[in-house]
Image (cartoon, grey):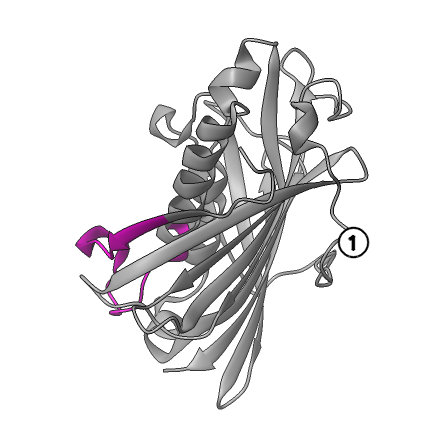
Amino acid sequence: MDQNAIFTQNINLPYSAIGANGQFRIDRLLNMFQDAASNHCNQLGISGLDMAKKQLKWLISRYQVQINKNLKWLEPLEIKTWRRPWKNLYELRQASILNLDGEELICALGIWVLVKASNSKPVRLTPHLPKELQTPADSCPELVKNDHNFIEFDHESEFKIRVHDLDLNQHVNNTVYTQWAMEALPAKFLFEFRPAHCCVSFLKESFYPDTILSCVKIDSHSDNLITRHSIFLKANMVKLTNLTINWKKI
């Protein structure tokens, strides 16, 4: 298969992707990207299950998502996704959601690393990818600043990790962190603003039955909102994830 091939699938936005405020949920959006990427990787022979046979696993390092328009229930959508390795350490996964007129509603970048299943240490990609999939990207897209390190936050929420939060790697699935981030934000903001850009940096894994703290710092203006989230392991306050979300008035 051509390593430059773009994987495409068509969907109608499901009812389960819409939140109480009538806007689509970010965690459901990341699930859509993850499912499309997994389907593509399965075709290429480099899926999570393929790597598990080699005692390896894929871990997400970062998501950057630009949201141009809200998605609507049952709206016909086309998801496109493609990949390239970068620096022999990172798998750049890009994705786009378009309507039937070809208008790009959402675009996203995911950065993945391949690690040993036993200790989560990164490995070089070339020994584990087919040769035809090893042509590197010319460069990495611009990365948004997302390294905030606040001592005090405006709000926080505590969560016990459930078995339901885990994926096949036996750690918390990446989409759950966005759920935790949203829950720390006062609900009134979710009914006044919609996400326009979201950046998520994954720093450490978390596991059942740990307890986490989801904390948020809010920069609020009349027409826009910036929320900076950090998620910690409660037992030792090790930071697991940083998120920066830019919001626009609904």
Residue found farthest to the right: 87
Magenta stretch: residue 17 in it?
Answer: yes
69 to 35, vertically: above or below: below
Q: Which of 182 and 131 is in front in this view?
A: 131
- Residue at 50% in and 31% down: 41
Count the numbered circles shown: 1
Q: Is residue 66 left or right of residue 112?
A: left
What amino acid type is highlighted by mark number 1?
A: Ser
Q: Give the range drawn in magenta.
A: 9-27
Q: Residue 149, located in which quarter of the rendered image?
A: bottom right
Q: Is residue 145 left or right of residue 40?
A: right
Residue that badge 1 annotates: 139
Q: Nearer the viewer, residue 121 or 83?
A: 83
Q: Is residue 149 left or right of residue 53?
A: right
- Residue at 24% in and 68% down: 72
Label 1 secondary element:
loop
Q: Which of 114 and 18 is in front in this view?
A: 114
| Residue 226, image x, y percentages | 57, 73
Crowding at dot 1, Cα within 10 Å, few <14 / some 14-19 / many 20+, comes out as: few
| Residue 63, image x, y percentages | 58, 51
Q: In which quarter of the image is the C terminus?
A: bottom left
Residue found farthest to the bottom: 222
- Residue at 73% in and 62% down: 142
| Residue 203, image x, y percentages | 68, 39
Residue found farthest to the front: 2
